[in-house]
Amino acid sequence: MSPYVRTVRTASGARAVQIVHSSRKGVRNIEHIGSAHDDAELAVLKEVARQRLNAGQLSFDLPGLNSENDAGSAPQAPTGGGCMAPITSNRMGVRLEALETAWKAVGLDGLDGADEVFRQLVTARLIEPTSK
Protein backbone atom coordinates (compact mmCIF):
# COMPACT_ATOMS: atom_id res chain seq x y z
CA MET A 1 0.00 0.00 0.00
CA SER A 2 1.42 3.38 -0.93
CA PRO A 3 1.78 6.03 1.76
CA TYR A 4 -0.98 8.58 2.17
CA VAL A 5 -1.77 11.65 4.26
CA ARG A 6 -4.57 11.50 6.79
CA THR A 7 -6.15 13.96 9.21
CA VAL A 8 -7.55 12.81 12.56
CA ARG A 9 -9.13 14.59 15.53
CA THR A 10 -7.09 14.63 18.72
CA ALA A 11 -8.47 14.46 22.26
CA SER A 12 -7.99 18.23 22.64
CA GLY A 13 -10.08 18.93 19.53
CA ALA A 14 -7.15 19.80 17.27
CA ARG A 15 -6.61 18.05 13.94
CA ALA A 16 -3.47 15.94 13.61
CA VAL A 17 -1.86 15.44 10.19
CA GLN A 18 -0.13 12.10 9.74
CA ILE A 19 1.53 10.09 6.99
CA VAL A 20 0.50 6.42 7.00
CA HIS A 21 3.33 4.44 5.41
CA SER A 22 1.95 0.93 5.62
CA SER A 23 -1.11 -0.90 6.83
CA ARG A 24 -0.60 -4.64 7.14
CA LYS A 25 -2.72 -6.90 9.28
CA GLY A 26 -4.11 -3.90 11.14
CA VAL A 27 -0.69 -2.53 12.13
CA ARG A 28 0.16 0.91 10.77
CA ASN A 29 3.48 2.71 10.49
CA ILE A 30 2.49 6.34 11.12
CA GLU A 31 4.62 9.47 10.96
CA HIS A 32 3.11 12.39 12.88
CA ILE A 33 3.58 15.74 11.10
CA GLY A 34 1.85 18.05 13.58
CA SER A 35 -1.42 19.28 15.04
CA ALA A 36 -3.45 22.18 13.69
CA HIS A 37 -5.90 24.34 15.62
CA ASP A 38 -7.30 26.25 12.62
CA ASP A 39 -7.70 25.86 8.85
CA ALA A 40 -4.55 27.83 7.98
CA GLU A 41 -2.34 25.62 10.14
CA LEU A 42 -4.04 22.55 8.69
CA ALA A 43 -3.26 23.66 5.13
CA VAL A 44 0.38 24.26 6.03
CA LEU A 45 0.73 20.85 7.68
CA LYS A 46 -0.89 19.10 4.73
CA GLU A 47 1.57 20.83 2.37
CA VAL A 48 4.50 19.75 4.59
CA ALA A 49 3.20 16.17 4.53
CA ARG A 50 2.80 16.28 0.73
CA GLN A 51 6.37 17.54 0.36
CA ARG A 52 7.66 14.73 2.59
CA LEU A 53 5.80 12.17 0.49
CA ASN A 54 7.29 13.59 -2.71
CA ALA A 55 10.81 14.07 -1.34
CA GLY A 56 13.48 12.91 -3.77
CA GLN A 57 11.14 12.75 -6.74
CA LEU A 58 12.05 14.77 -9.79
CA SER A 59 9.45 16.99 -11.41
CA PHE A 60 8.77 17.63 -15.08
CA ASP A 61 9.81 20.99 -16.45
CA LEU A 62 6.51 21.72 -18.18
CA PRO A 63 5.49 25.20 -19.33
CA GLY A 64 2.85 26.69 -17.05
CA LEU A 65 3.74 24.43 -14.12
CA ASN A 66 7.10 25.75 -13.03
CA SER A 67 7.84 29.02 -11.27
CA GLU A 68 8.82 30.87 -14.45
CA ASN A 69 6.84 31.54 -17.60
CA ASP A 70 7.84 30.39 -21.09
CA ALA A 71 10.15 33.36 -21.56
CA GLY A 72 11.89 32.54 -18.28
CA SER A 73 11.27 35.88 -16.60
CA ALA A 74 8.43 36.52 -14.18
CA PRO A 75 6.50 33.96 -12.17
CA GLN A 76 3.05 33.17 -13.44
CA ALA A 77 -0.05 31.91 -11.70
CA PRO A 78 -0.59 28.17 -12.10
CA THR A 79 -3.36 27.13 -14.42
CA GLY A 80 -6.00 25.18 -12.56
CA GLY A 81 -6.40 24.54 -8.89
CA GLY A 82 -4.07 21.57 -8.46
CA CYS A 83 -1.31 22.75 -10.82
CA MET A 84 -1.87 19.73 -13.06
CA ALA A 85 -0.91 19.47 -16.71
CA PRO A 86 -4.01 19.17 -18.89
CA ILE A 87 -4.39 15.99 -20.95
CA THR A 88 -5.07 17.13 -24.51
CA SER A 89 -5.17 13.74 -26.23
CA ASN A 90 -4.87 10.06 -25.59
CA ARG A 91 -3.73 8.00 -28.59
CA MET A 92 -3.72 4.24 -28.45
CA GLY A 93 -3.00 3.82 -32.16
CA VAL A 94 0.63 2.79 -31.75
CA ARG A 95 -0.22 0.15 -29.17
CA LEU A 96 -3.14 -1.15 -31.21
CA GLU A 97 -0.99 -1.38 -34.34
CA ALA A 98 1.68 -3.30 -32.40
CA LEU A 99 -0.91 -5.73 -31.06
CA GLU A 100 -2.39 -6.19 -34.55
CA THR A 101 1.08 -6.94 -35.96
CA ALA A 102 1.76 -9.44 -33.16
CA TRP A 103 -1.67 -11.05 -33.72
CA LYS A 104 -0.79 -11.62 -37.38
CA ALA A 105 2.81 -12.67 -36.68
CA VAL A 106 1.64 -15.44 -34.34
CA GLY A 107 -0.81 -16.56 -36.99
CA LEU A 108 -4.02 -16.06 -35.05
CA ASP A 109 -5.65 -14.20 -37.93
CA GLY A 110 -5.58 -17.38 -40.05
CA LEU A 111 -7.25 -19.66 -37.52
CA ASP A 112 -10.38 -21.47 -38.56
CA GLY A 113 -13.35 -19.74 -36.92
CA ALA A 114 -11.34 -16.72 -35.75
CA ASP A 115 -13.69 -13.79 -35.53
CA GLU A 116 -13.37 -10.05 -34.96
CA VAL A 117 -15.08 -10.11 -31.57
CA PHE A 118 -12.55 -12.56 -30.15
CA ARG A 119 -9.65 -10.44 -31.47
CA GLN A 120 -11.14 -7.33 -29.87
CA LEU A 121 -11.65 -9.12 -26.54
CA VAL A 122 -8.03 -10.29 -26.52
CA THR A 123 -6.83 -6.78 -27.41
CA ALA A 124 -8.98 -5.23 -24.67
CA ARG A 125 -7.63 -7.69 -22.09
CA LEU A 126 -4.03 -6.89 -23.08
CA ILE A 127 -4.57 -3.13 -22.92
CA GLU A 128 -6.63 -3.09 -19.71
CA PRO A 129 -6.11 -6.36 -17.78
CA THR A 130 -9.04 -5.66 -15.44
CA SER A 131 -11.55 -5.26 -18.28
CA LYS A 132 -14.00 -8.09 -18.74
Image (cartoon, rainbow, N blue to C red):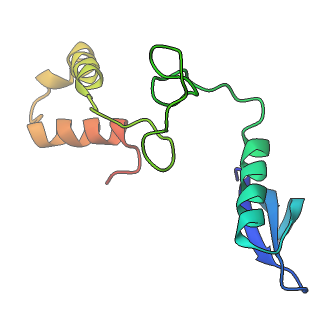
Residue 8: quadrant of the picture? bottom right
95 lies left or right of 40: left
Whether residue 5 can be seen here: yes
Relative depth, front residue between 64 and 52: 64
Q: Is residue 25 visible?
A: no
Q: Quadrant of residue 67?
A: top right
Task: Tell me what residue is drawn at x 43 percent, y 35 percent.
Answer: 85
Residue 92 x, y percent position in the rendering: 27, 29
How far across and down, in percent of the image, does residue 105 sit?
25, 13
Q: Is residue 58 above or below residue 41?
A: above
The residue nearer to you, when weighing 124 against 49, is: 49
Q: Assign the C terminus to one quadrant of the image.
A: bottom left
Residue closest to the eye, 69 or 20? 69
Name the residue rendered at 84%, 79% in the picture.
Answer: 14
Which residue is pictured at 80% across the width and 64% down the height?
17
- The image quarter containing residue 29 is bottom right
